[in-house]
Image (cartoon, rainbow, N blue to C red):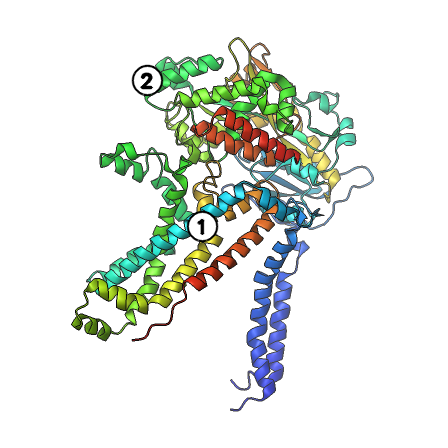
Amino acid sequence: MKKLFTGPVLLLVTVLFIVGLLAACSSDNDEVNGSTENNGNNEEDNNQNNDSNDGDAAVSGDGDISGELEIQYFVGGYGDSWWKEVISDFEDQYPDITITEHAGPNINDEMRSRWVSDDPPDVVYIDGAGSSETQMVEDGQLLDLTDWINDVKAENGSPLLDNLIVEPARYDGDIYSLPLVFDTWGTWYNETQFEAEGYEVPTDFDSYMSTMEAIQENEGIAPFATTGQHPYYFLRGALTPAFGAAGGDELLADIVTGAEGVWEREEVVATMEKVAQMQEAGYIYDGFGAYNHTQSQMNFLLGDHSFIPVGFWLPNEMANDVPDGFEFGFIPTPMQDAGEPFAIVPDLRPLAIAENASNPEAAKAFVEFVFTQEYATAFSEHTGAIMNLMGVDLSDNENVPSYLIEANAMINDPDQVQIYHRPHPMSADLETPIGDALISLMLGNMTVEEFTEAAEDATADYRGE
Amino acid sequence: MVQTKKQKYLFLAFCLVPTFLLFSIFTLYPLFSGLYYSFFDWSGSAASMEFIGWGNYVRIFNDSIIPRTIMHDYFLVVTKVFGIMILATFFAVAIMQLKIKEAPFYRIIFFFPNIMSVVVIGILWTFIYNPSMGLVNSGLEFLGLGSLTRPWLGSETWALPSIVLPSIWAGIGLFMLMLMGGIGTISKSYYEAAELDGANEWQQFWKVTLPLIWPQIKVSILYIVITTLNGSFIIVQVMTGGGPNNSTHVMGSYLYQQAFVQYNFGYGAAIGVMILVLSLITIFILQIFLRRDKVQY
């Protein structure tokens, strides 16, 4: 023992230990290349990304696309089967490309350190918790696509931009992303139950209230529920279309930008009065405040509630939990006055290229590759939702669920549904305090006046006053 | 076997340098980088950041949610200290003094929640509080107390008190064991002497047991206070996410929301510094209040 701890050996051991520690703590960029983060629930596709560590891609003189391409995509209600198909086809088309996928339900958090250290993936699909297109644009993380996208042509030879259902968001006139998924929030119900019990499918706010009254009397349940842990579900799923119906694009723009006095406007107060009416009549489930995303959807499927405002992901996400005989029915949230068409405000999930992408040419090729009729159709088949590309005929497609065909037909009929647009999504700094006050209003702990005051305070804070 | 001075210093270096290095990397570095980031306007998801001086600290004083989060934290501190200490002392004394046969069984049962992750406890109790199929409301209805049922975690009034119960349940076991260790060291002769002097069981508890296990009680209280101020955000995050309408937000969960949901990482770091300062002040004050002369019989 004495020999072991003599001076030089001891010193050597100490130095080695410290060097070892420092080495372990240093950054190692090579490790990042070629890594794959996949959702544990899904089949991993590591074979695609094992042998290429070529570093930055090269574009040869004739425009060939090669090298490594890193794609980050969130896996939520839409699953990842569509992504697997597209990526596999892209690799077949461009054999010199090796794709590294970073995917999963928590991928936005997992990849955060890459973005912070200015070593982002090349292509990013912006969706799910922990991601914000507005924030990424503000932070200068996304490539300005304006010049490039104007030259990109669709399969029919016309500019791709003319073929999108909804145009890309513009920040000071510049385009930083292309809306990939045309999602829209609406209200879901159980078609089987409505047919069996003879409940009327609502067409406006008055019929919505009368149907909820019938359900409350007949079933003895609170007909409406949403998640209280994420107040923005009601904000986006019910209030946003209601504001679209009441004040059009102009009101929506003022709401998302936090214009002074917007929550005191007559049409906004009238909409909030409708929410208060729902609460006072006992139609809003009083325990919704504790519901998280999954609980609210699960209790809806179990028949504890008859209406729930969520997006198109619902049937796909809950596919394994649907009780026998349950048929999904979808309507745009009926908050509009009698005699007016439904209102829909698209909620888009965009695809973007990182400002510091190491292979921007391959990234652009991938984005261009995705926006085709073939993959738009495949998207509806895989996810039960709609891709943001015009001219996709779903009416005779047996692989697409019936609710989507009905909803698609409804959305495309201006007599039934009017589509409104927000200039960009609402910032979390504005959405969070307004959502908090909204929960209080829906629980009956706040009056409409108190809510209006709280919402105005939130907009003042947001504007920095 | 006399060590030379050099050998002695080398041995000390061998013991201390790696420890200090690890402490620096995992404690001092995050502490000072947190302090550093609190002076920046930074989203936490990009490389760019802007120095804003005391801006985030000024914002803390103007944020109406901050006082609520502090109140909620101290509500949890007070209820947990009283709840855990009273029950842990009661169970420890009962198991040690009553000499019941099933003592080892109860020891395991009470300690069991300490083995479970806080996240699991949070999810478990979320089901227990579920308004439609949870144990609490079903139990109340079974007892004919249907009028007392309510959406516990969904109510702005009841959500925070509802979080206290699992926090106490999860904490009792560890402190019960600590107190049992203390009680075990008390010589039986003190109790015999007290009994001869005519002291009843209550008097024995107040005059013999409590003064002699005071060091353990003091450590337990300080430990509960520190872990609550620093760690209660986990159970809040799992059970309510800080809602409804911020009625359960504690400082830690609000920090998380600001830093990772609202992309105000710099502000979140400033809230972290506030938690550190408040924890230090609280512990300092508690040290004064809990100071007692060491009792020896």
Residue A271: x and y, percent? 53, 19
Q: Chain of mark 1?
A: B
Q: Give me the disc on residue B6.
A: none
Closest to the observer, A239 or B219: B219
Nearest to the observer: residue A274 or residue A324: A274
Q: Amino acid at mark 2?
A: Asn
Query: Mark 1, mark 2: which one is toward the viewer?
Result: 1
Q: Residue at x 58, y 22 (%)?
A: A264
The residue lying furthest to the right in this view is A61
Above or below — where is B196 with respect to A327? below
* Image label count: 2
A334 or A81, which is in the foreground?
A334
Residue A346, position in %: x, y? Answer: 60, 24
Residue B99 seen in the figure: no
Q: Quadrant of residue A411?
A: top right
Instruction: State the SS at label 1.
Output: helix
Q: Residue at x 67, y 28 (%)?
A: A371
Quadrant of res B98? bottom left
Report helix, strand or loop for mark 2. helix
Circle 1 residues within 10 Å: few <14, some 14–19, many ≥20: some
Image-based side of A309 in relation to B30, left or right? left
Q: Residue at x 66, y 57 (%)?
A: A28
Quadrant containing the C terminus of chain A in the rendered view: top right
Amino acid at the residue labelled 1? Tyr
Circle 2 sits on which residue?
Answer: A218
Q: Which residue is mark 1?
A: B74
Q: Is residue B172 left or right of residue A255?
A: left
**Residue B285, percent across and down?**
47, 60
